[in-house]
Amino acid sequence: MTEPTGDDPRDALRTSLGSFSTEGVNPATTDLDLLPLDEQVALMCAENAVVPDAVTAQAPQIAAAIELTVAGMREGGRIVYVGAGTPGRLGVLDASEIPPTYGMDPSRVVGVISGGDTAIRTAVENAEDDDVAGAAAMDELAISGNDTVIGISASGRTPYVLGALNRARERGAATVGFACNTGSPIGAASDVAIETVVGPEVVTGSTRLKAGTAQKLVLNTISTLTMVRLGKVYGNLMVDVRATNEKLRARSERIVMLATGTDAVTAASALAAVDGWVKAAILVVVTGLAGDEAVRLLHEHDGMLREAVAAAS
């Protein structure tokens, strides 16, 4: 075997990767391919069970990230997720689900993946190593002071993500570095560092597994609670849902019924009076306002339903 000479840049990369827990060899799974299927399934379940605790341990940092996103979005800013490979795809996924769920303009929560949209379905080789492209993506989005850029990387060192975060900070944005290792470069480059340490993967280095699960949980928490604090949720009901199909139209009626205790006929009538806006329909039922008055009052209170109800009382 040829010994490393130190001249190959991959020697340093191999050495650095060996220091990341996400690249470690999991002693519990070294005989994974030899186990019967029921034991393989049990082993994966046991490994997956460590993820929620790793996420919970970062609760203060997650809350700090949400404070940034809420403050920026209240001033018209955006949430911008940046990642490569699985983290990039998860960012795109989370961003794509916000508009239909919470009635948010698609331009307000954006997913950026190294290699562009092609990389959502197909690996784009070497794209994650391009820090210049990461910086350029921030320039193309005209990132500014009200935006929050959340860089996602299992290792915490992905050059594309690091380039994006550094440029975002130069442009005045708030930044969050989300990694699955401690002391990550992206964490050090950000205003808030979220580091969910899930340990070595079942299959060595396959960070779409526990690391990916942690990323999904954290992104769920950030985007959901940002929407809650922006008034997109009433109790635990998504009152800005867009009724774009029959299922969602039925859900809209059910939400109005749950929020007000009214019947289906009244809920449907209220929704018709406000062009299907669930939040406004609730206000109509609760206060007796006409549809246009309910809509006007909600706009006056920045869409905050509880404030609008109090003002009408």
Image (tube, rainbow, N blue to C red):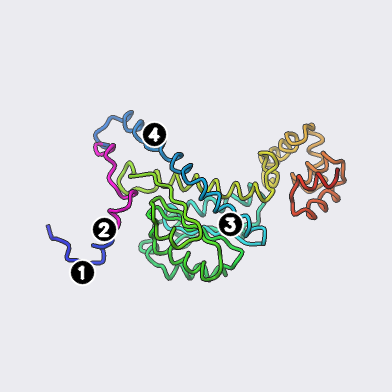
Name, please, the residue furthest toward the left.
Answer: 1
Q: Is residue 272 magenta?
A: no
| Label of residue 7 in the image | 1
Of 121 and 28, nearer the camera is 28
**Which numbered disc flags the more N-terminal residue, 3 or 1?**
1
**Which numbered disc flags the more N-terminal residue, 4 or 2?**
2
The x and y percentages for residue 104 are 65, 53
Which residue in the structure is indicated by mark 2? 14
**Which numbered disc flags the more N-terminal residue, 1 or 4?**
1
Q: The C terminus is located in which quarter?
A: top right
The x and y percentages for residue 254 are 72, 35
| Label of residue 45 in the image | 4
Residue 88 in view in this figure: no
Is residue 186 shown left or right of residue 263? left
User: How far separated are the C-alphas under marks 3 and 1?
Assistant: 43 Å
Residue at the spot 63% in from the left edge and 49% down from the top edge: 227
User: How far separated are the C-alphas under marks 4 and 2?
Assistant: 29 Å
Element class at badge 4: helix
The span picked out in magenta is: 16-31
Is residue 281 shown left or right of residue 219? right
| Label of residue 68 in the image | 3
Element class at badge 3: helix
Mark 4 vs mark 2, foreground winner is: 2
Q: Amino acid at mark 3?
A: Leu
User: How far separated are the C-alphas under marks 2 and 3?
Assistant: 35 Å
